[in-house]
Amino acid sequence: MTTLLSVDRISKAFGGLQALNECSLSVEKGSITGLIGPNGSGKTTLFNVITGYEKPDSGSVTFEEADITRVGPSRVFALGVGRTFQITRIFSRITVLENMLVATQRDEGWLRGLTRSKSSKSELAAAMEWLDFVGIDRLASQPAGSLSFGQRKLLELAYVLVADPDVILLDEPAGGVNLTLINEIADKIQSLNKGGKTFLIVEHNMEFVMNLCDRVTVMHQGTDLVSGTPSEIRNDPRVLDAYLGGSDDDDVEEAS
Amino acid sequence: MLRVRNVWWIGALAALVLFPLIETNPTYTSIGIFTLIFMGCATSWNMFSGYSGYINLGSAVSYGVGAYTLTLLADHLHVPGNGDLFWLIPVGGFAAMIVAVPVGLVALRVRRHTFVVITIAIFFVFQLSATNFSFTGGTSGLQLPLIPWLETNYNKPFYYAALAITVFAALLSFAVRRSRFGLQLLAIRDDEDRAAGLGVKVFAVKLTGFTMSAFAVGMGGALYAVFLGQIYPQFVFDPIFDISIALMSIFGGLGTLTGPLLGALVLESMQQYLTIRFSNGSLYLIIFGALFLIVVLFMPQGIVVYLSDWRSRRSARRAEGARVVVGEAS
């Protein structure tokens, strides 16, 4: 397997807070990689750095052998890295279908937009196909602001997919979603993965991550604590410590 | 097939074309000219600020630059006082676009309230410059050569020039609304960061929209200069203009095609009429205030959106009613 996306010793501080501290991560092509860790361990900040929303203080991000460390969000997306947000972000005052159309041409010059109509036939077809895939095609002409929370999650997934990125970063796809929909989302991810899509997933739902992911990286205090297969992670004492707000090694020894 | 909506548009356009032929009183055709200038400017302003949500309260910069460009050029090129002056109106529009590029490069780096404040600040820089530089004539302004046309027909060319600007602005706004570019502006309004993360080159798109919207506003200012024959900094770089354009669009429906046209038609013609009728330049402010209270309280998205919502609710009720009747019959 080849590495599609790799993060090499990224550091990022916000004022006095060291959000990321020499954090490294690699995502194999065709894999589903999980990224877990306690709240505040820097997972979302890492996503922001990868997708160009934050500029890191040091370190590098490489995608398909190209350095994308300080590239802006629209360019990163154009290259083929799509993402969803932890707090779902959609365009609420335009229709669901128009939401899809915003993303259909991920790498089109800005001047081209002036001379072409909102959509072509093939783009419309692709948009409807992906809406159908996530199961909200009947809502295509509704304003996106009228969607429920779960439907928004599905829409966000659909419009990232319509641009056909090579790797998709999902920030808590199962957060705040009911069990039926969680399973549905997991199924979608699995079937897309079989079709060749690579995923990097931040998620707190352990069952979801352990069932879905090929490899899991655990983050703690801004750095990658440990990486391995789900079963390795499950049995690693350092992971438990990180989650239970555990202690330094000395404390453990004293207690024992 | 001719759809109802198109019939409305054609009817409205026909009424505007016929107006100066039927109403020849120069007092009223003058009202028509000012109203059309504001309709064009508000539509053009809305094409960027309404679609993108970047409320530009410095649109008088474009208006003033258009007016001053035309006046200064007419002087330098020794254009005589006749219809030739009209050819300079698009030049005023282009000058406004050129000026909009550096203004946009500065102002579009910030968002929302900060953007609004920056545009106001830039506006005052222009107003102060026009008041204090010597080439602008300072506070005494600049004169254009007199056009020796007969009083009875004097207003007609200006009226149709203003109508041309308005039609141009409306067609451009319509084309933008249907283009990919327009969709990107709407996406930026709803969530700029998300749009960037879906491949929209947000800064380039914003700057293009900002610059394009300056064109018709600049032409409006240039036409205003030719019509009045003289310009003063406090009238072409007028903070009331900044606010009026925005309020007309909000009143009619921000981000809609017809909203700014309707808003400017109602508010500007009313203002002009009240000012003349009661020879009181401030009376309209009271009525404006009352109207805005009503619109903001009862139809916060503007008249056009309110009416279309009302119509769709009514047709939904009718469909509901029809189902009930069918249900009873079966």
Image (cartoon, coloured by chain):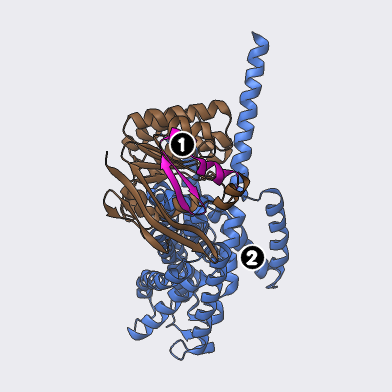
Chain colours: A brown, B blue
**Label 2 Cα crowd, 10 Å radius (few <14 / some 14-19 / many 20+):** many
Question: Disc 2 marks which residue?
Answer: B271
Residue at the top extreme, as displayed? B330
Checking the image for residue B86, the label placed there is none
Residue type pointed to by label 2? Gln
- Distance from Cα at disc 2 to Cα at disc 1: 33 Å
A80 displayed left or right of B15? left
Dot 2 or dot 1, earlier in sequence: 1
Percent position of residue B69, x then y: 40, 78
Percent position of residue B324, x then y: 66, 18
A235 displayed left or right of B295? left
> In the image, which residues are magenta?
A216-245
Q: Split into 4 quadrants, where in the image is the C terminus of chain B? A: top right
Checking the image for residue B3, the label placed there is 1
State whether residue B38 is above or below residue A170: below
- Tell whether position A165 is magenta: no
User: Chain under label 2?
Assistant: B
State whether residue A158 is above or below residue B278: above
Q: Nearer the viewer, residue A136 or A22?
A: A22
Q: Tell me the residue at 27%/38% (across/down).
A: A1
Q: Is residue B13 visible?
A: no
Residue type pointed to by label 1? Arg
Q: Nearer the viewer, residue A52 or A223?
A: A223
Q: Split into 4 quadrants, where in the image is the N terminus of chain B? A: top left
Percent position of residue B108, x then y: 47, 66
B157 displayed left or right of B54? left
Q: Tell me the residue at 47%/50% (across/down).
A: B194
Secondary structure at badge 2 equals helix
- Tell whether position A231 is magenta: yes
Q: Nearer the viewer, residue A32 or B79?
A: A32
Q: Is residue B264 visible?
A: yes
State whether residue A181 is above or below residue A17: above
